[in-house]
Image (cartoon, coloured by chain):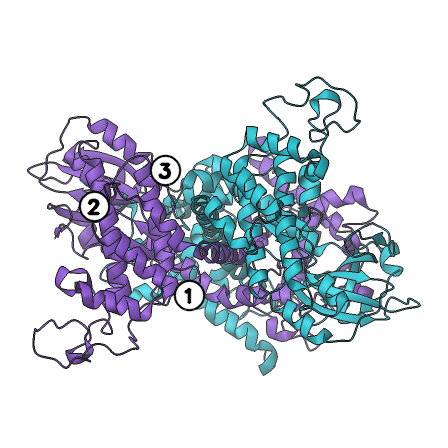
Chain colours: A cyan, B purple
């Protein structure tokens, strides 16, 4: 192979530091007006007929909404999505899998989530029953689900169907959706278990774990604002003006907006959450925080109602309890202490809120935490004026997050296409069963495709050194896929033959050869 | 190649209808507990050491947030991103490109946007000057930008730097960001042009074009609520209760939230928009609408201030004008008529709003459109109580849109990795310059990699028919990339040799061979 071929298409070569970094490609390919060929100019001008066909742009480019963010997030986002895929794909090890039923209802591939062992129950504080949580896969849809098994509890039959259906209808971005409820003996118990099926949210943790498990929130001695041991302390104890462990106010408001949103949806039905506490609210991503990574979901919705077998009995009392739970939750987050919402610590906690946060936040907590003075019952809508313009901040953040994701997706779009293309090309070439057949191997369509493959992948430098330039590969494959009119010079392996051929002819040869290959089995000809 | 090899790894085969559809793969691979191999179980159990290494999950799976939406959107989203990439990549045809300067300031690859011809000015109604819009590429960053060239206008020098810097600092999800302003003679004019550089938003249109160019909004005769011809009409003319051409109220509120958000940001600085009209507000996507596709951007910000050369003079008057423009804009959208906001039609328009929309919307329009009764100046914040709970709807929609994008991205993640892997593999195998060299071709590492390539791409069925199964290819490449301990059976082309080898050994061979190839040039050995 000579250097001539490389020279024909020298715009393909890009600075060496980008050699194997595909993602840098869209940023790194400078081409000036002189280098533009007819084909580069196909889109947008007179050649309207050709425009439709020239689908793949030569360089996937990037919407420049906020490029600084887009590039900053990229690796982090990739890693995050990767961890999620990994979590979705995780399976129990053989010991654990062997100790569990192969199939429970319509679900298989069970993996316990509370413990790495099978069949270790977890005494739930919320539901009074022993529960075990599993990840499982639906047998038909392959959807990954979260199964909550409640042991030793009989399902009440009264109006149960209505209750379950009411909860299954709740679709909200901040609620883990209930998908199914069934009674099963598949766990080989003496008595059947009730299983609640929810969407599985990978890579999240509870608010409790996120904000109340670190050492910072458990200050010892006089630094702790709550006098837990009851000893005499100086007046100033725990009243330091800077509480390093406290959450950023903007983060608390992000939680307030999302939690009030889900409460509002449920109370509108009307349904009551009945599980608004730190250990039932999931929060996205890892604990590093960052923009748009404070998405929350309320989990375990409907369990209390379904175990009761009824909704309407005292739903209005439950709704009022929800509102008080909401105030308590926000207070605990604001003073970053679980004991902070206990009656005896209330004054201390409110002092912390007063000193460190805005009036709006303090008013919101007081409004929902304290009993109503008037006869008119409270509603969640009363938090809206206190949130005020913070809605705008949330919406702006979400737009930015969406832009980042769209940018990433636009970059990735072409990878899937090129991957499929290269798979088809590899499937065509060097097939062993055809190596003896002249028509199939060294002549005709397949031959120039083979030379093209050499041109794409086996480029060599001036001294014969191999060059692997992913930008060259991507550009060649894109022109090949688009059927560009650009011409390249292919050289035979013995360097005796030189063929000048356009990408468009190569593309046609490829289509013919692939169709022939696909028809090979059906016609039976060789 | 025999069938044995395929039988060793028969879980790779998937239903034939999914053969070439990569995206269906994650949904279509059922595998039961019995078929799980040691390697499938690596993650999550006892093999903690191995966990880190086994990065690629065998099947990219999907977060099940709202699967119905996710699958519904998929093709549409793909097409949308495709169109955007295409628009970003579009170039002028040769005639047009030839008639334009090769480079203007730091930008090249100019393509006129107002017309398919070069140098056709467009008389701007907003700025009183002749303008031409271009798409262009920045010479260093390769960012695609929108250039607005203003002809025949001198830049005032007084405090100009401050004004430009103030506008360049405005970053908001609903404002097209000003990136640069420069004076240039590169267009070969008798006099220099001022060029304003903004982010380029591909595939958007103005609110004017989206909602006021269809026939529906131009009802003729008595059906038109506005008596434009002034003729006598019956009392009921134009008062039909159903206006088919009217926009959905939720859509108008989406616009209200976004436009009020950007006004709020600017007025807070304080800066004034001075260009709040239908032809300056861009709206995303194509006109089919749908969830989350009503994103708007205000374009052309800062031009008026910069041409004035000052901000602070009468900014408060401009701010009040903005608020009135805002009311007028929403009124035009609500009655779906450009004449609707004219003084003589005001009563008719407000009747339409009254009959078809909520009180909140009517109040919002009246509040901003009519002059203030009190001496206290209006502010944009006063729209927040009228928007009320509609903020929640917007946030919920944006969360859903984000979930959809994340799902898509999670599916695409692996394509880029597999593409790079296959490029490296193809670069290694069948290199012509090594075909005569035994060490490099038919023995050792390269030989088993060649057999592996045959196994992956050249599978044949029972009757020798070629099988191209993208699921098989993906699974093999994933196990290969991960260095799985699964073993496969490779058969030589002459069917005389059968090699049982694990993916992990293949992976090591690949690493060695690729390193050797990369060192080939530098050491000079062959």
Classify mark 1: helix, strand or loop. Answer: loop
Same chain for mark 1 and mark 2? The answer is yes
Residue sitting at x 47%, y 36%: A16
Residue A438 place in picture, x, y as percent: 55, 69
Q: Earlier in the sequence, mark 1 or mark 2?
A: 1
Give the quadrant of residue B220: bottom left
Q: What is the CA distance from the residue labelled 1 to the residue labelled 2?
A: 32 Å
Q: Chain of mark 2?
A: B
Q: Chain of mark 3?
A: B
Q: Where, quadrant-wise, is the C terminus of chain A in this rendering?
A: bottom right
Q: Which mark is residue B321?
A: 2
Residue B507 place in picture, x, y as percent: 70, 47
Q: Which mark is residue B141?
A: 3
Residue B112 visible? The answer is no
Q: Chain of mark 1?
A: B
Classify mark 3: helix, strand or loop. Answer: loop
């Amino acid at each position: 192979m000579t250097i001539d071929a490389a020279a024909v298409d020298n715009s393909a070569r890009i600075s060496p530091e980008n050699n194997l970094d595909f993602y840098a490609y869209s940023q790194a390919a400078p081409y000036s007006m002189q280098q533009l060929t007819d084909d580069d100019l196909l889109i947008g001008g007179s050649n309207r007929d050709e425009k439709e066909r020239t689908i793949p742009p030569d360089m996937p480019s990037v919407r420049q909404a906020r490029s600084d963010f887009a590039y900053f997030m990229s690796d982090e986002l990739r890693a995050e999505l990767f961890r999620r895929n990994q979590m979705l794909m995780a399976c129990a090890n053989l010991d654990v899998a062997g100790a569990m039923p192969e199939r429970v209802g319509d679900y298989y591939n069970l993996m316990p989530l509370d413990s790495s062992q099978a069949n270790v129950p977890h005494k739930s504080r919320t539901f009074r029953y022993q529960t075990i949580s599993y990840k499982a896969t639906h047998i038909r849809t392959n959807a990954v689900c979260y199964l909550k098994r409640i042991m030793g509890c009989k399902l009440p039959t009264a109006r149960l169907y209505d209750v379950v259906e009411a909860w299954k209808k709740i679709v909200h971005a901040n609620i883990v959706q209930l998908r199914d409820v069934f009674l099963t003996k598949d766990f080989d118990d003496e008595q059947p278990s009730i299983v609640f099926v929810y969407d599985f949210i990978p890579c999240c943790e509870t608010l409790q774990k996120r904000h109340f498990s670190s050492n910072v929130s458990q200050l010892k001695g006089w630094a702790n604002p709550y006098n837990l041991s009851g000893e005499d302390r100086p007046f100033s104890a725990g009243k330091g003006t800077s509480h390093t462990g406290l959450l950023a106010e903007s983060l608390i408001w992000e939680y307030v907006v999302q939690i009030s949103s889900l409460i509002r949806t449920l109370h509108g039905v009307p349904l009551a959450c009945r599980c608004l506490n730190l250990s039932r609210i999931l929060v996205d991503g890892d604990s590093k925080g960052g923009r748009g990574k404070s998405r929350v979901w309320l989990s375990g919705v409907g369990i209390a109602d379904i175990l009761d077998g009824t909704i309407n009995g005292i739903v209005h009392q439950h709704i009022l309890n929800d509102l008080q739970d909401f105030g308590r939750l926000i207070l605990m987050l604001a003073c970053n202490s679980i004991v902070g919402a206990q009656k005896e610590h209330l004054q201390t906690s409110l002092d912390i809120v007063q000193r460190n946060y805005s009036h709006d936040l303090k008013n919101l907590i007081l409004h929902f935490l304290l009993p109503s003075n008037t006869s008119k019952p409270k509603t969640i809508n009363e938090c809206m004026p206190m949130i005020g313009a913070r809605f705008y901040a949330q919406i702006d953040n979400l737009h930015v997050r969406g832009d980042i994701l769209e940018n990433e997706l636009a970059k990735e779009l072409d990878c899937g296409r090129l991957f499929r293309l290269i798979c088809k090309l590899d499937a065509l070439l060097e097939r062993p069963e055809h190596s003896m057949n002249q028509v199939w191997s060294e002549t005709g369509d397949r031959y120039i495709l083979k030379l093209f493959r050499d041109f794409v992948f086996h480029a060599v430098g001036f001294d014969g050194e191999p060059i692997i330039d992913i930008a060259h590969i991507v550009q060649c494959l894109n022109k090949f896929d688009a059927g560009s009119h650009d011409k390249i010079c292919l050289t035979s392996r013995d360097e005796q033959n030189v063929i000048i051929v356009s990408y468009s002819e190569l593309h046609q040869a490829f289509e013919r050869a692939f169709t022939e290959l696909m028809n090979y089995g059906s016609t039976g000809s060789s």
